[in-house]
Image: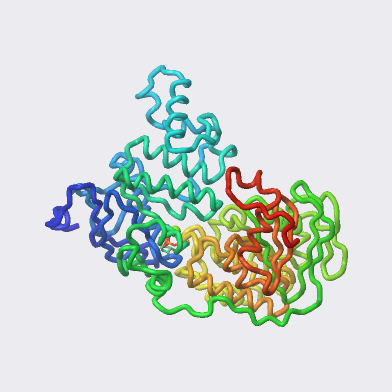
Amino acid sequence: MTDEAQNPPEALLDGTVQIRNLSKAFPNVQALTDVSMDIRPGEILAFMGENGAGKSTLLKILNGDYQPDSGTITLDGQRIAFSNPRDAHRAGIRVIYQEPEIIPGVDVAENIWVGELPKRFGLLHRRRMDELVRQNLREYGFEDILPTHLMGDELSSAQRQLVEIMRALKSGVRVLALDEPTSSLTDEEVERLFVLVRRLRDEGVAIIYVSHRINEILRLCDRVAILRDGRLITVKPAAELNESEIVRLMVGRELSDVFQRNRAGAEREVLRVEGLYSNWHDNVSMHINAGEVVGFAGLVGAGRTELAKVIFGEYPRNGGRIYLEGQSVNIRRPDDAISKGIGFAPEDRKREGLVLIRSVLENASLAILKRLSWLHFVRRRLERSIVSGFIERLRVRTPSLEQEAGKLSGGNQQKVVLARWLAAKPKLLILDEPTRGIDVGAKAEIYRLVDDLANEGLAIMFISSELPELLGLADRIYVMQNGRITGELSGASATEEAVLELAMTEKTSTALPGSVTPTLEGSTL
Ligand SMILES: Nc1ncnc2c1ncn2[C@@H]1O[C@H](COP(=O)(O)OP(=O)(O)OP(=O)(O)O)[C@@H](O)[C@H]1O
Ligand SMILES: [Mg+2]
């Protein structure tokens, strides 16, 4: 590290974080190359880039989780280098990851006051701490979170993030980074988060906001930094950018015709669900034909993921019937489902899908192992070629198939789980939010794959909260609300308005407290 970098001539003393010539390599991966940028107080700066571009790595360096190989970071003209997150927090820099680590049994108040409790309070009682926390939460408009709520099970991931932000504020944060904070939030929770983030910006905090959602970035952020392959491509005011410009800068090429839909639409029925009851469902009936992509829309909590899990044998069915290719089937465990030709790529791929310490190859081939095991000796080679084909098509950024899955970037980990199920070639493929956390270029690739698979005769159950992709990709759409199917849309009747009507009206009051959704009495269904 050079002396001139230690005292850069243009050193800013106003709380700006100056990053100069930062590089970081992992074995076989150059994650960051010569990145220089300023992070300014009172500004929301977006980081955008494809999966594996280096966004999280940059945040982890700021947070003291990783150390750079070269380059410098200065704050108020002072060189800073963190050997661990605690150092970073002390300097006022804090990164909130999407799924904050949870210490079991710790409640909201304890979490916010963590580390400070003995010093600030001595023998002081819990009651005072609760009162302060309650005041704090109220001040920022989060009365629904109680100081005594347990961080683990009693809070949603949105609420957990908010508590982490409160905790950062408590310790005088100056630079706050959020890594894909909204990917599992409802629209309402996103709005609440935005209000909070804007307010912190106005109070002079420097905010870094990492997301794949371009419209959110354009709405929220002041400047946008675009990374590609570990290099900073540009930093521009958001006002000078539009969606297609951002995409072009991110992927370095034009993306056209994102949605394909060349399907023949076979009549052969693959899945039929009749009068299904479960702990979550009330008389659900639907069917999916071979060669069909059937979308499932609804608000978070409508019962879509649970329906997938009942079909897959992960959750119990209390009544009704499930038919596969005309045969009534009794699927009690996921193993039954897999052996009957059902594949399921779950929404929470990190927790449910991936063995982080195993290789990319092992993870991606888990589901085809059964199919290939009779050919024991050729298995390895065959497995490799099937898997590597999908890894390539999904543009998974990995140095090799032997890489530990846990060392891939978040989006690339998700692609590995998708590759697994695509490689398994089931009859029925259930995809739950398959593009969550995935960059635009790879999204287009996934849409193309889904289209190809449908053309090859797979029946595809496609659960998504992104209406444009549902409308763009699905042949038909079932809309769910409170564990029921409230309507089926296809062709010209499948519009955003129609989906929202079916997803929100009638029983809305419980789903969206305080919302101003118009009631549509006697709506089309
Ligand atoms: N601990 C690690 N060991 C080895 N390689 C790593 C490690 N952490 C990250 N990488 C690699 O560094 C590169 C950048 O990863 P990073 O997580 O920063 O990407 P990202 O931009 O956050 O992507 P995403 O949008 O998918 O979250 C990737 O190729 C990734 O595989
Ligand atoms: Mg990341």
Q: Position of residue 205 (x, y in %)?
A: 31, 46
Residue 313 figure quarter: bottom right
Q: Is residue 454 left or right of residue 216?
A: right
Answer yes or no: is residue 392 visible. yes
Colouring style: rainbow
Residue located at (66% from left, 66% from top) = 462
Residue located at (77% from left, 73% from top) = 289
Ligand 1 found in image quarter: bottom left
Q: Position of residue 487 (x, y in %)?
A: 74, 61
In the rendered image, the quadrant that contains the N terminus is bottom left
Q: Is residue 102 left or right of residue 55?
A: right
Q: Position of residue 427 (x, y in %)?
A: 74, 71
Residue located at (45% from left, 18% from top) = 125
Residue in the foreground of this view, choosing between 230 and 380: 230
**Image vertical order of residue 106 relative to residue 429, above or below:** above
Q: Is residue 60 left or right of residue 42?
A: right
